[in-house]
Image: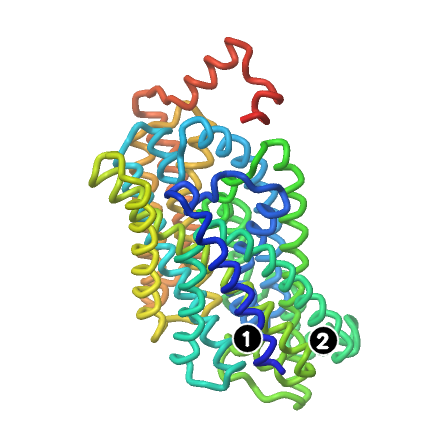
Amino acid sequence: MILTIGVLYLLVILIIGLFSMKHQKDMDTFYTGGRRFGPWLVALAISSTTMSGYGFIGLTGLVYEHGYAIFMIGIFATAGIFVSFLVLAKPMRRITQKFGALTIPDLLEIRYNSKAVRGITALAILGGAIGYQMAQYKALGNMLQTVLGVDYKLALFIGVAILTVYVVGGGMISAVWTDLVQMIVMVVGALIVFIGGMRMVGGMSQLNTELESINPDMVQAFHTTGPIGIFAFISYFFIYVIGHQGQPHVVSKFYMIRKLSMLKWACIIAASTYALTALLWFVGLYTRVMVERGEMAVPASPDLVAPMFIETFFPPLVAGIIFAAVMAAIMSTSEAFLLVASSSIVRDIYQQIIKKGEKIPEKTELALSRWITLAVIVVTFLLSLNPPDIVGWLGNASWGIFAASLVPVLSIGILWKRATRIAAIWSSSLGFIFSVGLYILKVKEIYVPALDTGAIALIISTVSFVGISLITKAESSPIFEEKGRQIEKGIESPASIDAG
């Protein structure tokens, strides 16, 4: 029954991907869907890609180990959705519509008049996307390994093969429509698990009593000892509230909405549905209690907590729906990252830097986009055969890379006229170097800082961005000049913006 439901779900996703192929005309439709989607589709695409396999699998495992403290990531990420909409949604949508940008580096080159800024941010996005995609693939392999009862590598191959068909074929149109289906499945699955599991453990009071008897820190927002202390709490604020604005797989969705007036509804929908799916993390708490009671075996890895709990305690029909929900979380983010990574290569590095903006025939650029997407899938698949870390920490590191490399140059730069090209180059470079370098030192246990490595890198990149901007010569930017001319002429109004 579990296998049947899983196969049916995957078939629906494949059909959507194959149907979307005929709507692909050029690079614009492949990467942005032609900017024609309403608030529900955009909102559910944002919430589903924010959750991801890292959220459903990785964070559930971390909740099992550390308790409620990990829930702060969900609370901060929900707040981060609101902050991203507030700071970035309108200016990004307005600028990209006016100047025809398709990617985040597209927008940044326009803002700073710099190919160097485009190249650096494109490489940072590519590097972070590969790391995050490894987290998704590891979660996908662990899930299908449990459902299909096969070896991890074979399970991973099956999952990636299905993902390849609908991402390479359908592009962003396929991704958005599958996100709609996947988010519905994710919300239903999370609610089933939350309610069913709460009944098993005897209610919230009983759950908290047993967790506190295991370890008092399990019921605290941060621990008195260990790696999830007050500095982790502060780090999560930086990475998930502020850092949400630097997640390219999420904020690039702002390009796709049909009208600016729809953004306020999309914001509410995205934050609400994300918070609902985060209820699945209670599986980590339920599992910890069941293991202590002796009613469940100890999971061999934190990444197997969710699959084991679902398979052990739920009837096959319900378990099949929940497994489909977890696969939905994994695949929705995988498709987004694959498109983000391939666009960095095709659009930002090849077309705009190597070919110097030369116009490419529509059929050629679409074919190239698909081939590069396929190449990224193959590379990340090979790297994921022996992944270096558990899903939760691998995903957290990638969030930090994006935050440090992109938040200052994008969020501050898009609103602050005084920001300069040189500051953007240094800030993005330092953010990427420090986020990756400090993470490697931490994994090797050469240097283990109190704050999360991504949070430290974000602070460094932000301070350098503001400081260097203030000591370098002010520069003009077309995004501010154009807006100024529109205001002078009296043509920038809510009606004209919505019409755009």
Q: Position of residue 439 (x, y in %)?
A: 36, 60
Question: Considering the numbered disc 2 on the image, is that residue within a helix, a strand or a loop?
Answer: helix
Tell me which label, 2 or 1, sits earlier in the chain: 1
Q: Quadrant of the N terminus?
A: bottom right
Compute the Cα span from label 2 to label 1: 25 Å
Residue at (50% x, 29% y) in the render: 94
**Badge 2: how crowded within 10 Å, few (<14), some, or many (20+)?**
many
Residue pointed to by mark 1: 7
Exactly how many numbered labels are in the figure? 2
In the depicted structure, whether residue 58 falls above or below residue 482: below
Q: Is residue 307 visible?
A: yes
Please indicate whether residue 284 sits to the left or right of residue 460 in the image: right
Q: Amino acid at mark 2?
A: Gly
Q: Amino acid at mark 1?
A: Val
Between 67 and 243, the one lying in front of the other is 243
Residue at x 47%, y 19% (from the top left corner): 483
For label 2, the residue is 197
